[in-house]
Amino acid sequence: MSRILAIVGRPNVGKSTLFNRLVGMRQAIIDPTSGVTRDRNYGKSEWNGIGFSVIDTGGYVHDSDDVFESEIKKQVNLAIEEADVLLFLVDVKVGLTPMDEDVARLLRAAKKKVFLVANKVDTYQRMDETAEFYRLGLGDILCISAMNGSGTGELLDLVVAAFPETGKKETEEETHIPRIAIAGKPNVGKSSLINALLGDERHIVTPIPGTTRDSIHSRYKAYHFDFILIDTAGIRKKAKVHENIEFYSVMRSIRSIEDCDVCILMTDALEGFGAQDVNIVRIIEKNHKGIVVVVNKWDLISKETNTHLTFERQIRDKMAPFQDVPVIFTSVLEKQRIFKTLEMVNRVFQNRSRRIPTRELNDTLLPLLEATPPPSVKGKFVKIKFLTQLPTPYPAFALFCNHPQYIKEPYKRFVENKLREQFDFTGAPMEVFFRKK
């Protein structure tokens, strides 16, 4: 279950500053000008081993004729609906304002856990000035300075303790079931694939793009397979996402990719493998998830000799440099090769979990790397002496050598290609690290 924290308040109280501190990077724009943040901004944070999502919202203004202010109000309302815990940020320098009281009324109606946080408390004197905020009727006031970080540790202790427990307890057995997310652009047949596999019209299917909005989980247990299938909303280019509901749908889809083991990337044979498909591949690769590319609606393509080979070559060229990915051509409506898709998903899951004994790894790879060593740099010759697989959920290898700083990206790709030649890691993104011996 995902945990979501939303930061709300009137304009220019320091919400983006606190957001940047919680996510550990300058992700949100900060400026003394009021109203800089307009859209909801998402980030990931962790405290005491508990990970959670953080939403930065625009400044809430109750009554305004400004078109941006009305849109920001919608964004704030949606963030409040989505969040599990809310931080209501106020500015101790300015003091209590009517806009703060408007936000407080909104939060009291939300029936969510709310922490009233006084920002810009840089001195003990300002701590005494926070007393007026008790008039908001939201309980104790937590004093912080988002700029220098004081008080944020105590605040996060309370926040992570307030997150709800997972509503549906998973059994020990269920936690080990592979989670398969089906992702892709809108209207490529994701829900139709799950319906075909389950043999039941469980998910609504229409020709209208964007029919699926939530990420829907289904248990598939048949033909010696046991998977959790996750149907996701279509992921469109950011510039084309205008509706608030679709924005949340896309965010849930990306979160489903982050939480899965293997991702089936579905693409439309009629539209071809486009730039947005490549973007989704990069999201999957960045999160080190297994990937199987499924080209749907293949029955609608007029075919010649080797049409599928040409199409597959085009896909791999666009996916470069990560090309060791299975590509399957299906027709979900005709039920062509949908079970082959499951077989390949199972193989990719095994590949992603594969562990190579250290001795076998060194006996196999070291002679190949000695035959083709890295090029010398500044008269220095790099000698790789030892390699081992790291204890990560995905394939990752550490190679120990005398001058790791001279290893360039092309040689890393060479090592990865040799690993893929010798061992089956098809469909599994890989990391190769060089370390000083």
Image (cartoon, helix red, strand yellow):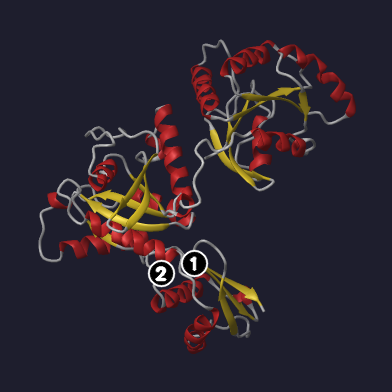
Q: Residues within 10 Å of mark 1 (few under 14, many from 20)?
A: many
Q: CA distance from mark 2 to mark 1?
A: 8 Å
Picture coordinates of residue 295, whole percent (x, y)? 24, 53
Contact? badges 2 and 1 (CB < 8 Å): yes
Residue type highlighted by circle 1: Pro
Please give the residue where the numbered disc 2 appears in the rendered image: 425
Considering the numbered disc 2 on the image, is that residue within a helix, a strand or a loop?
Answer: loop
Point out residue 129 in the picture as x, y percentages from the top left corner.
Answer: 84, 19
Front residue of this view, candidates 95 and 299: 299
Mark 2 burial class by Cα count in 10 Å: few <14, some 14-19, many 20+: many
Residue 210 visible in rendering = yes
Q: Position of residue 195 (x, y in %)?
A: 25, 42
Q: Which amino acid, by three-letter code, is at mark 2?
A: Phe
Query: Can you tell which quarter of the image residue 377 is in?
Result: bottom right
Relative horizontal placement of residue 424, taking residue 18 as reference (left or right): left
The answer to whether any part of residue 321 appears in the image is no
Q: Which residue appears at 43% of the width and 78% of the height?
A: 418
* Above or below 276: residue 141: above
